[in-house]
Image (cartoon, rainbow, N blue to C red):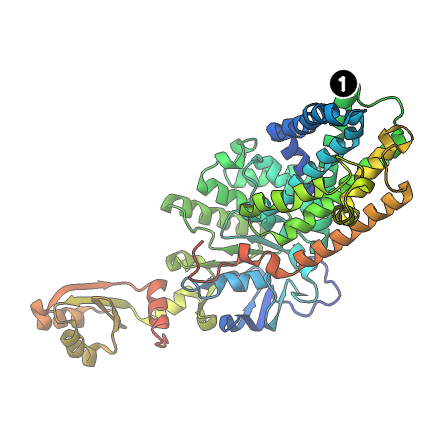
Amino acid sequence: MVLRPIYAVLERELLRMVRQRTRLVAAMVRPLIWLLVIGGGFAAIAGGDYKSFLVPGVLGMTMLFGAMLAALGTVYDKESGVMRMMLVAPLPRAWMVIAKLIAAAVAAATQALLLLVLLALLGYVGRGAEWGLLGAAIAATSLACAGIGMLTASFSRTLENFAGIMNFVIFPVFFLSGSLYPVRELPPVLYWAATLNPYTYGVDLLKHALLRGGAGADFSVPFDLAVLAAATVASAAVASLRFSRESAYEPMIHVPAGRAR
Amino acid sequence: MNAPRAPGVTTSAAVRATGLVKRYGELAAVDGLDLEIAPGEFFGLLGPNGSGKTTTLHMLATLLRPSAGAASVAGFDIAASPVQVRASIGLVFQESALDRSLTVAQNLRFAGLLHDLAPRVIEARSRELLELFDLSERRDQPVGALSGGMRRALDIVRGVLHQPRCLLLDEPTIGLDLPNRRRIWRFIERLRARTGMTVLLTTHYLEEADGCDRVVFIRKGRLVESGAPRSLVAQLGRHILEVEGVDLDALVAALEPKLGPALREGDVAHFRYADEDLAFLAALQTQVGSRAQAWRVRRPNLNDVFLWVAAGKRVA
């Protein structure tokens, strides 16, 4: 009953991803700029093997941006009217949120795998990687990022909020994680902020999988997985609740008389 | 298309609403509406903008929760079984519900999968319906490249792909030019002839509702008149006389004792005239002479019914 609708949403998401090539290219170029330019620059100050340390961070970044952009497509769906098609589908509304979440996660994981191939070709990933754990890390991180994305989407009514979301959600989530620096070396306030950020645990998991012996990781693998799973479930639940309330889509389908469109 | 009765089916009506209310704060958009639509009926919900037509449709389609009252569609209660209601209806919104970046076929595939149809079934039905709606050649074009009329037609195809028992159309011809409006009505007729599905539509182009089996007029969320278009029009009279004049007040005062109450619409006064024989009106025109600058006699239509109803006058 719910498999075909979920597949429908997933298929549309992947079609869109392939069609929007600039978005896909940006998803590959953005992390490489961070790795090669910022990583190169900071390596000069910090010394050591900063670029290797940065590899899990930029892989996570691809998933964070990929999942957020895909999940925020829900807001675009509300504005463009595609949401109407989903609202009249004969299944409980919560499944639409879950379908969007899965689709965003698959889109993010696909981008991460593409980047992984590029990183391997450039020689940044290879020996020392634990591939099984890496697969789990990509899956868990993509799902958690998609969860954060759906949660954000459930609170934003228009695409005009997009710049705000960029500044107040995506950037803080990225910077307040262990992507650029080890969490345990952050000043106390930032440290606590980072530990409250579910995305931190995704990057941590990627460090376990990609850096030899989990160098630079701050938490244990089971703890990382547990936090990511909990974050995914919690955000999906809240987003479903938000979307089940008619106020979430009423402004789109009902324009009270006298109000300008 | 007689689907087996599911448990909890309470009625044989395609749509039944009792005391339906939707309030937005102080404003009651729908205010105690009763409806009963028989299976296979072609039913028009008529009224001016803001009269509560769309709100009613959205409540019936389970997109909005009623503030009070109850309704069932295809035998399923909208509050208790929203998923079954959505499975038995097709809804075509006033605004497009299509993805402009996808092709015609991709949109239908998306809609079909959302309704749990097998890809094979979607393929076969799309071909048949696109043929019926003159869209076969557009299959692989992006929806953004279609004209407004074609997009509306595709929206209807999208709404009936899963063979709903009841099709809800919200202003299906709004924003279209006349040829396209006629095309859409032709498509709806073909569809009804082919499937026998119940069609509930809203429109404020009243002349377009002439083909309905039954219409109801709503105003401020309340039902004000209902019946078959032909009998509503017939009840109004055989003719409508429209009069314009410099001193319209005096003219109306002079004519009302002879013709009954007038309906003033701007600079025009409307009178109902029940007789087929126009000799009396011709004589009256001679009497009035040049005081009437315009004197038109014509057949009434649904617009007239609505004007009289909206003015709070009984039609019968």
Which residue is at the far left? Answer: B290
The residue carrying pointer 1 sits among few (fewer than 14), some (14 to 19) or many (20 or more) residues within 10 Å by Cα, namely few
Q: Is residue B73 left or right of residue B189?
A: right
Question: x and y percent of residue A244 in the render?
Answer: 67, 58
- Residue B238 visible in this rendered orientation of the protein: yes
Q: Determine the residue positioned at 45% across, 53% down.
A: A261
Determine which quarter of the picture holds residue A253: bottom right
Residue depicted at 73% across the width and 23% down the height: A44
Residue A82 visible in the shown view: no
Residue under label 1, please give it.
A122
Q: Amino acid at mark 1?
A: Leu
Task: Judge left or right: residue A102 versus residue B100.
Answer: right
Camera-side residue of A195 and B111: A195
x and y percentages locating residue B35 in the rendered image = 54, 70
Q: How many marks?
A: 1
Image coords of residue A220 (percent x, y): 90, 42
Residue in front for this viewpoint, A251 or A222: A222
Q: Residue furthest bottom?
A: B257
State the image quarter where residue A26 is shown.
top right
Q: Is residue B247 left or right of residue A7?
A: left
Element under disc 1? loop
- The quadrant the N terminus of chain B occupies is bottom right
Of the 4 image quadrants, the one containing the C terminus of chain B is: bottom left
Q: Chain of mark 1?
A: A
Residue at 86% of width from left, 47% of height from top? A226
Closer to us: B102 or B244: B102
